Image (cartoon, helix red, strand yellow):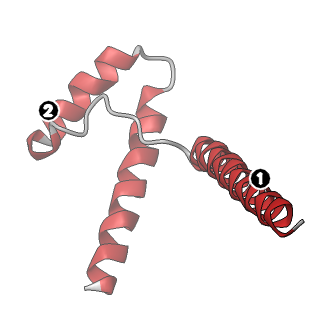
Amino acid sequence: QKKKKKQETRQETRERRRRKKKANGKSKQDVAEESKHQEKGDESKIGKKKASGKSKKLANKKKNKKKKKKKKKQEQETRMEEAEARGKSKKQTD
């Protein structure tokens, strides 16, 4: 199955390269039309652009930053609450 998947991805990249070569100097729509005629089965894929590695990386970075910020805020809140609780217990013992 892994081999099959690898083969498919290789085929896809080959096709992508070929399309790119064909597209040199043509408008996007013409190329889309040509590819549509070529592969009627993959109509869902035409016009959809997958996130490139760089943009994906940036998006994940942003997400992780947000998560970290949220976690930090939560930790700060728990620390404050603990400090308050400690303060109250100290007052009671005095």
Q: Residue furthest front?
A: 94
C-alpha span from label 2 to label 1: 64 Å
Q: Quadrant of the N terminus?
A: bottom left
Res 37 label: 2
Residue tagged 1: 80
Q: Toward which corner of the image does residue 13 lie, by quadrant? A: bottom left
Compared across the picture, whether 8 is left or right of 54 comes to left
Q: Identify which residue is drawn at 70% across, 50% down.
A: 77
Amino acid at the residue labelled 2: His
Disc 2 or 1, which lies upstream in sequence? 2
Outermost residue toward the right in this view: 94
Furthest toward the left, the residue is 40
Image quarter where the C terminus lies is bottom right
Q: Secondary structure at mark 2?
A: helix
Residue 37 pos. (x, y %): 14, 32
Name above or below for residue 4 compared with residue 46. Answer: below
Residue nearest the viewer, comparing 63 with 45? 63
- Pick the front one: 73 or 45: 73
**How many other residues sit within 10 Å of disc 2, few (<14), some (14-19) or many (≥20)?**
few
Q: Position of residue 41 (x, y in %)?
A: 9, 46
Q: Is residue 47 above or below residue 6?
A: above
x and y, in percent, of residue 25 in the image = 50, 18
